[in-house]
Image (cartoon, rainbow, N blue to C red):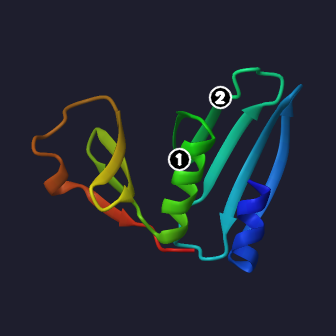
Amino acid sequence: MHAMAERLGAKAELRATPVRDGEVEFELVPAEPTAATVTVSVDLTDPDGELWVTVAGEGETGDLLWLRNVVDAAVAGNVTLLEGRGRRRLEIALGPDDVRSTTTYGRGFVPLPWRRHARITRFAAY
């Protein structure tokens, strides 16, 4: 994470916060306010080295390769958030034909097709 922050220079700030024994949260905060923030939680005592990677409020587990891919996508501005009634979907474009997404569901009625009515946020590049 530190090497990525150094590579970005003034485009982003890296913040490290101890959460509890052995767990640290790293946050890559872009200087551009409309760019997506990337947060990584890591338990330094975990021998498996699993990371919890969060982008624009949506998170999932991954490894160092996943972290690098997510940071590269966020830096390039390849992150989109769709928010509709009862759903929230984060799309991360890792390449021209490789878009990864995660969807969270709220409570209540979900209109179909929901994407037509969704509010779309396309995050800027760093």
Report crowding for label 2: few under 14, some 14 to 19, many 20 or more residues within 10 A (C-alpha): some
Q: Mark 2 is on which residue type?
A: Glu
> For the C terminus, which image quadrant?
bottom right
**Circle 2 SS class:** loop
Using the image, determine if residue 86 lies above or below residue 13.
Answer: above
Residue at left offset 74%, top offset 64%: 5
Res. 56 in view = no
State yes or no: discs 2 and 1 in contact (Cβ < 8 Å). no
**N-terminal-most mark, 2 or 1:** 2
Q: Residue 34 location, x and y as percent?
A: 52, 72
Residue at left 70%, top 38%?
A: 41
Q: Position of residue 12 (x, y in %)?
A: 70, 70
Residue 30 versus residue 24 in the image, above or below: below
Residue 59 visible from this viewpoint: yes
65 vs 85, left or right, is right
Q: Nearer the viewer, mark 2 or mark 1?
A: 2
Figure label count: 2
In the image, what residue type sits under mark 1? Gly
Where residue 30 appears, x then y in whole percent? 65, 69
In the rendered image, residue 82, in percent from the top left (x then y), is placed at: 31, 54
The reply, left or right, for residue 122 in relation to residue 17 is left
The residue labelled by disc 1 is 57
Query: Residue, x 59% and y 52% (percent of image)?
Result: 68
Q: Quadrant of residue 112?
A: top left
Please give left or right for residue 99 compared with residue 26 in the image.
left
**Mark 1: which secondary structure?**
loop
Q: Which residue is mark 2?
A: 50
Label 1 Cα neighbours within 10 Å, binned few <14 / some 14-19 / many ≥20: few
Position of 17 with respect to 73 (left or right) is right
